[in-house]
Amino acid sequence: MKLNKLLAGSVTATLLASALLAGGHGTHWGYTGHEAPENWGNLSADYSLCKSGKSQSPINITSSVTVESKSLEKIGFDYSTGISSVINNGHTVQVNFDKGSSITVDGIKFSLVQFHFHTPSENQIDGKNFPLEGHFVHATEDGSLAVIALMFEDGTENPFIKKVWAKTPHEAGGKNAISISAKEVNTLLPTNKDYYRFSGSLTTPPCSEGVRWLVLKNYTTISKSQVKEFIHLFHDHSNNRPVQAINARKVMK
C-alpha cells in the first residue's frame, strides 16, 4: 500500500507510509511459500507483532463476539475529492485520492489516503469469505489509523471496479493516471452505512496494532470475471491474510 509522496511532509507520515506499504523497503514478504502470512512474524524482528500481537486483523465477526453498543456513532463521511492514480504494488491494486476527503470518528478527523483490495475477503462475517474486500485507509497527522472495510459479493459487474481495472498496470510497480470523481466513489458505498467496529491491526507487515476497524454491514457487488481479472494480475494467487484470534476483544455493532 504505497503512500510515499502522498503523505510526505512529516516524520509520522514517513513511518505510516512504510507501515502501509506492501511493496516497500525492508524484508520482503508475500502470500505464498516461505514469505506467506504464517511466516511473517519470523521474517524480521520488525514484523514480530504478526505472531505475538493480541489484537491482530482480520477477524471472523460472529454473534458470539459482537455486542450491542448504544454509543456507536454514525461515521461522518466527507468524501469530496476524487481518485487521481492507480498503482500495482505487487501485492494489491491501490487507488490514491486527492487530498481533502475524510471521515470523522470519535470526534477525530481522519484523512482519506487510499483504497486497496484483497481477494478473497480478509475479514469474515459468520465464517463467510467474500470474493473481494476493499479497504479505505484513513490517517491523522499523528499517525492514528482508521480503516473502512467494504465487502463485494457475487453479482452484477461493478462499474467502479471496471474503471479501476481498466487502468491498473499489469506490471508490479506500475502507476497510471486515472480520473474517478467523488460522486462515483460515494456511489460505490452502500446507502446504509451501519458497521461493525473493533480494534485491530494492519493486515500486512509490520502488523501494527491500534487500528480502528469499521466493517460495513452492507455490501456492493462484483462479477466473477472481475474477480478473476484481479487474481490474474497477481499470478493467480490470493492476497488475503487468514483470520486471527479474537482473544479478549469484542466487536461493537
Image (cartoon, helix red, strand yellow):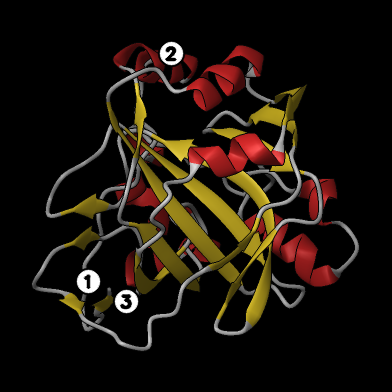
Give the residue displayed 54% in from the left and 39% down from the top: 187
Query: What is the quadrant of residue 213 in the picture?
Result: bottom left
Q: Is residue 190 visible?
A: yes
Vertically, is 164 above or below 183?
Answer: above
Amino acid beneath label 3: Lys
- Secondary structure, mark 3, is loop
Q: Which residue is mark 1?
A: 246
Tell me, yes or no, whether the two marked residues, 3 and 1, touch with CB atoms within 8 Å. Answer: no
Q: Earlier in the sequence, mark 2 or mark 3?
A: 3
Give the residue displayed 73% in from the left and 78% down from the top: 142
Nearer the observer, 64 or 216 = 216
Q: Earlier in the sequence, mark 2 or mark 1?
A: 2
Give the residue displayed 40% in from the left and 16% down from the top: 226
Q: Which residue is mark 3?
A: 54
- Secondary structure, mark 2, is helix
Q: Is residue 23 visible?
A: no
Vertically, is 38 above or below 13?
Answer: above
Outermost right residue: 9
